[in-house]
Image (cartoon, rainbow, N blue to C red):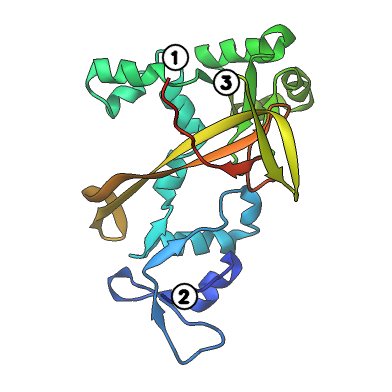
Amino acid sequence: MRSFRVPFHQILQHTTLGEGRRLIYKPPHQANQAFEVSVVYFRAGYAPSDYNDKADWEARLQVERSAAIKCPSILTHLAGTKKVQQVLATPHSPHLKRFLPDEKKAAAVLKTFAPIYPMDKSEAGLEARGMAQDPATASRYVLKPQREGGGNNVYRQAIPKFLKEQPEPHWPAHILMEMIEPPALTNTIFRNGELQRGGVIGELGVYGVCLWRNKIDGQMHSGVQEVVKNYEAGYLLRTKGDQSEEGGVAAGFGAVDSVCLIDI
């Protein structure tokens, strides 16, 4: 399977949209050859710093308008943000029912969520602001921006000081989430070329695959036409020392681990 790595600032130079919105790529070292792109996997594009100028944003738009499968598409990308998690998980949120009309199922799923609050001036946001600015209650929470990959969160007692140093209009760019307090475990981690023994915390993430076809009205996507695939695709267990608040593997805070199932 042929693959190419192309930074955002080169996409417009080397790609065009052909008939049927086909994304055509002409490698600079093979100018006489053209390849139709079937899948675009975004290795970057998750942080504002990945878009340096207007051309980078236009490059993302060109990819989104194409018929290539995007991983993730902009809608999937936005659906995975912490703000959407907050909208679904804020206590007494009515929005989960849009996706789970059965009230009993919606209530059961809502119980599995850690409480997440906005940091705006809504009723829930004002409640969150009060908890975040009070050191006594902030110790139970983590403040998260709309970022991925680890190293961006503010934890517990550091939250009030962080907020004092930020302009208040920037506060709504974060969500406030109640910390998950896992049971105490002891294990060994192989990290940075050495063995580390002691208390650890494991974080289990379950992956899913969803592939769908969109209805097209002119150049606009007007909704999901057909769900082609939708299934569970495995898991990732990451383990970190219990003294570390951050857990990102890519950022170097955690280590990839395997699950050991026991009968209790």
Task: Residue type at mark 1: give it.
Answer: Pro
Which residue bears the numbered disc 1? 91
Name the outermost residue toward the top: 136
Q: CA distance from mark 3 to mark 1?
A: 21 Å
Task: Residue type at mark 2: give it.
Answer: Thr
Residue 189 at least partly seen? yes
Q: Residue at x 27, y 71 (%)?
A: 20
Residue 15: numbered disc: 2
Q: How many marks?
A: 3
Which residue bears the numbered disc 3? 182
> Crowding at label 3, few (<14), some or many (≥20) Cα neighbours within 10 Å?
few
Q: Nearer the viewer, residue 24 or 181?
A: 181
In screen coordinates, is 212 left or right of 47?
A: left
In the depicted structure, whether residue 232 falls above or below residue 186: below
For marks 3 and 2, the one nearer the N-term is 2
> Crowding at label 1, few (<14), some or many (≥20) Cα neighbours within 10 Å?
some
Q: CA distance from mark 2 to mark 1?
A: 46 Å
Task: Residue type at mark 3: give it.
Answer: Pro
Pick the quarter of the image with the C terminus. Answer: top left
Residue 222 place in picture, x, y as percent: 26, 49
Q: Nearer the viewer, mark 3 or mark 1?
A: 3
